[in-house]
């Protein structure tokens, strides 16, 4: 099996598995006052501290959640509600159209049900959001509740300069949320230094468990809760702490961040070989997103594990199926709940036409990727693309 | 053999896929997304293309351990089946959308794509027998679907596989239950999949709007009423005419004239025909020698009638041994060669152009 879909989820790290297994064998609600509860609380708080340290945050800024989707919903809706409550003229959201659906659909829900308005940011052909574009969309910022721009795009891997964007937003008094689900562990992420007000991250994209994530939220950021109950997590996110998942999340984050530089070099080299090899086999294949060696503010401008390519004349879902049949697992990007492949909204946002958007594949490499994975793709990609091209999708 | 199993989410296609796996083939499941509005959950299990059905199909594929994908054919289905359905009614004809879907979607767009992707055959849960290139009725007369497959050509049949033709529907459900498929007890779908509430007239009214015209009684030539759209009528229809003619004898729709939008009605004696003329036929195998004697079925679940078929005017002239009521232009006249042992063989079909 050649697993090249790390942007969807990653294999659990052995140290995560060990730490979680140990924790699962214990009893104790971190909110209980007795010895078992105190022990659970201690483990959860140690995890909070370790995770905070790895990401340049203070422990009190870490809110554990059920994952990236919850964190995005909490940030977008919670910041919107709190900011509008403090100033009723703040009804506008300023958002990139290339965001993950957890952000987009939260925004659209607020527009449809809660009187919000949205300004969609222009996206560079590379997928990047420029501070100038944000500044223009914010205007004087008086009517803006919150802005949201992802740190790195989940489909095409483009990184934006989040520190510059945060400074731009703050210049007109607007808080910035960033979805850093793909960025953490792949590119340097320092919450405090970036200046953002809220940051979404999740465990299963970096070797941790599914269903465990965090929203890093500045102490001075007002955020209305989505989940009401026992008042855990600063009263912003109620719910019994899932201590085993939190331990797994923290171990994964600390490990991934600690090995980031070394890993990025390895994974980046494999990715470069993959892209060069594929374009040698299929000369008209086109790389989407920023160039492989793109540099942004002294760091990588593209996720080292991301290879997103369009194969003109071939349908992405035919390519995926043919590769799957040959033991190679990758992704076409978005699919609706019924599993219908849709042209990627990210590619459409960067100005690709529907045809190019439908003809694309995402290979995402990660901590288990090897040279033989790359070899496996290069061995079959030529004939697979050729076959897919012969098989249009019943289109005329 | 590499086989593509078209999986609707119903019990028939689930069992067909399972039988293909049992037979040792390399099977891949595909659900066809045919509805433009995927998120609209249909009521109950009706409608062959709801999100719920896609999930049901996926559940079965996962249990079988076969790859499963959703193919989006909504655009083609809309053009080739739904729009065609509306246009046919607008032209005063009565189409069969299932037959059109088999002709243009399942055994054309899907089959073509499957073959180009390297598959050898497409397996479906249709109730019909297919062996040695000969298409025959299912052993389960009540569930037989050979009528809606009658439009297939030898090339299409060569790459098709219908493993359920030799068993009853009850047996299909038993197999599904034995395997623990949740769809074992899923109700049969009876409606046209894109009209899940069964209100064809309402659907057409939304698409075509109000197109009023007269209802004329054939025996007197008198206008006996008005209608909102001739598309609401089918030749042979008795109920829901919304008019009362002079006497109390039941009236039937005799004909629909789309330009003047005239719906002609008449008494039972006028509603019967014994000769049918058709458009150009298609054959499931080599074209038969004509004139010839066959049985003809004039609508889905209709009773077959003995007939003599001659070639004429580019189409067929079908002389019926017993007069029939409700032979509507646009319907398919499917010809069978009776065979009590192996099942009646489908010879071919042609669309009814005119009946008298």
Image (tube, rainbow, N blue to C red):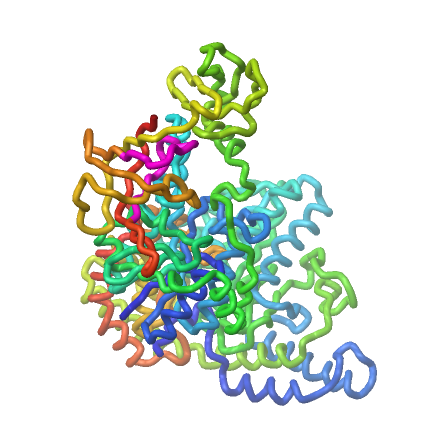
What's the magenta region?
B318-336
Quadrant of residue A328 in the image? bottom left
Q: Is residue A157 visible?
A: no
- Which quarter of the rendering shows the C terminus of chain A? top left
Classify residue B69 as left or right of residue B114: right
Residue placed furthest toward the front: B321
Number of marks: 0
In this rendering, is residue A50 above or below B122? below
In this rendering, is residue A192 above or below B229? below
Magenta region includes residue A11: no
Magenta region includes residue B334: yes
Q: Looking at the magenta stretch, what is its main secondary structure?
A: strand
Classify residue A390 as left or right of residue A171: left
The residue positioned 71% from the left and 58% from the top of the image is: A225
Q: Position of residue A307 (x, y in %)?
A: 33, 65
Query: In front: A102, or B306?
Result: B306
In this rendering, is residue A212 above or below A113? below
Q: Position of residue B113 (x, y in %)?
A: 28, 56
Query: In front: A300, or B95?
Result: B95
Q: Position of residue B23 (x, y in %)?
A: 34, 74
The residue positioned 31% from the left and 32% from the top of the image is: B276
Query: In front: B350, or B339?
Result: B339
- Which quarter of the rendering shows the N terminus of chain A? bottom left
The residue positioned 32% from the left and 73% from the top of the image is: B25
């Amino acid at each position: 099996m050649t697993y090249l879909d790390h942007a969807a989820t990653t294999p659990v790290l052995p140290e995560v598995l060990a730490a979680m297994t140990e924790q699962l064998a214990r009893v104790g609600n971190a909110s209980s006052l007795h010895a078992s509860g105190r022990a659970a609380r201690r483990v959860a708080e140690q995890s909070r501290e370790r995770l905070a340290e790895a990401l340049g945050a203070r422990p009190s800024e870490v809110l554990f959640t059920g994952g990236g989707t919850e964190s995005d919903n909490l940030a977008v809706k919670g910041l919107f509600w709190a900011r509008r409550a403090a100033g009723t003229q703040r009804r506008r959201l300023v958002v990139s159209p290339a965001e993950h659906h957890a952000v987009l659909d939260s925004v659209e829900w607020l527009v449809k049900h809660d009187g919000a308005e949205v300004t969609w940011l222009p996206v560079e052909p590379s997928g990047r959001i420029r501070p100038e574009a944000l500044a223009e969309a914010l205007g004087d910022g008086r009517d803006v509740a919150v802005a949201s721009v992802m740190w790195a795009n989940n489909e095409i891997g483009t990184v934006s300069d989040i520190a510059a964007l945060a400074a731009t937003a703050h210049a007109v008094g607007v808080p910035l949320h960033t979805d850093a689900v793909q960025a953490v562990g792949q590119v340097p992420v320092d919450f405090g230094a970036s200046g953002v007000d809220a940051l979404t991250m999740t465990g299963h994209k970096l070797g941790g468990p599914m269903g465990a994530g965090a929203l890093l939220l500045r102490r001075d950021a007002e955020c209305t809760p989505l989940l009401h109950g026992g008042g855990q997590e600063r009263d912003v996110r109620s719910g019994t702490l899932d201590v085993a998942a939190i331990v797994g999340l923290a171990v994964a984050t600390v490990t991934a961040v600690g090995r980031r530089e070394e890993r990025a070099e390895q994974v980046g080299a494999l990715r470069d070989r993959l892209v060069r090899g594929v374009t040698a086999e299929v000369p008209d294949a086109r790389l989407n997103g920023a160039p492989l060696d793109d540099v942004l503010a002294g760091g990588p401008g593209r996720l080292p594990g991301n290879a997103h390519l369009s194969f003109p004349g071939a349908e992405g879902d035919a390519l995926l199926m043919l590769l799957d049949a040959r033991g190679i697992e990758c992704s076409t990007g978005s699919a609706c709940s019924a599993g219908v492949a849709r042209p990627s909204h990210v590619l459409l946002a960067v100005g690709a036409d529907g045809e190019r958007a439908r003809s694309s594949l995402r290979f995402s490499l990660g901590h288990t990727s090897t040279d033989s994975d790359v070899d496996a793709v290069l061995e079959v990609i030529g004939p697979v693309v050729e076959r897919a091209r012969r098989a249009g999708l019943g289109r005329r | 053999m590499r086989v593509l199993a078209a999986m609707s989410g119903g019990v028939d296609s689930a069992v067909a896929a399972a039988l293909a796996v049992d037979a040792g083939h390399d099977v891949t499941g595909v659900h066809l997304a045919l509805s433009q509005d995927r998120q609209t959950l249909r009521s109950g299990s009706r409608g062959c293309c709801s999100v719920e059905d896609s999930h049901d199909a996926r559940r079965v594929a996962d249990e079988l351990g076969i790859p499963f994908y959703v193919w989006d054919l909504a655009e083609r289905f809309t053009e080739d089946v739904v729009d065609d359905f509306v246009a046919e009614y607008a032209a005063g004809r009565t189409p069969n959308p299932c037959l059109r879907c088999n002709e243009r979607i399942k055994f054309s767009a899907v089959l073509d794509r499957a073959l180009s992707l390297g598959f050898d055959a497409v397996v479906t849960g249709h109730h019909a027998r297919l062996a040695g290139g000969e298409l025959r009725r299912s052993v389960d007369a009540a569930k037989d679907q050979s009528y809606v497959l009658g439009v297939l050509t030898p090339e299409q049949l060569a790459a098709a596989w219908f493993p359920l033709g030799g068993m009853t529907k009850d047996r299909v459900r038993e197999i599904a239950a034995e395997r623990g498929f949740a769809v074992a007890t899923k109700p049969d779908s009876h409606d046209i999949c894109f009209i899940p509430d069964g209100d064809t007239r309402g659907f057409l009214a939304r698409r075509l709007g109000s197109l009023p015209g007269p209802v004329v009684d054939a025996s007197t030539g008198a206008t006996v009423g008005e209608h909102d759209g001739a598309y609401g009528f089918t030749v042979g229809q008795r109920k829901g005419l919304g008019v009362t003619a002079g006497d109390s004898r039941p009236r039937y729709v005799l004909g629909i004239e789309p330009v003047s939008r005239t719906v002609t009605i008449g008494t039972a004696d006028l509603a019967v025909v014994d000769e049918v003329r058709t458009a150009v036929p298609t054959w499931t195998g080599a074209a038969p020698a004509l004139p010839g004697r066959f049985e003809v079925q004039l609508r889905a679940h209709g009773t077959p009638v003995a007939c003599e078929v001659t070639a004429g005017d580019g189409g067929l002239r079908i002389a019926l041994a017993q007069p029939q009521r409700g032979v509507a232009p646009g319907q398919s006249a499917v010809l069978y060669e009776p065979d009590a042992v192996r099942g009646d063989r489908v010879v071919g079909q042609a669309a009814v152009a005119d009946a008298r």
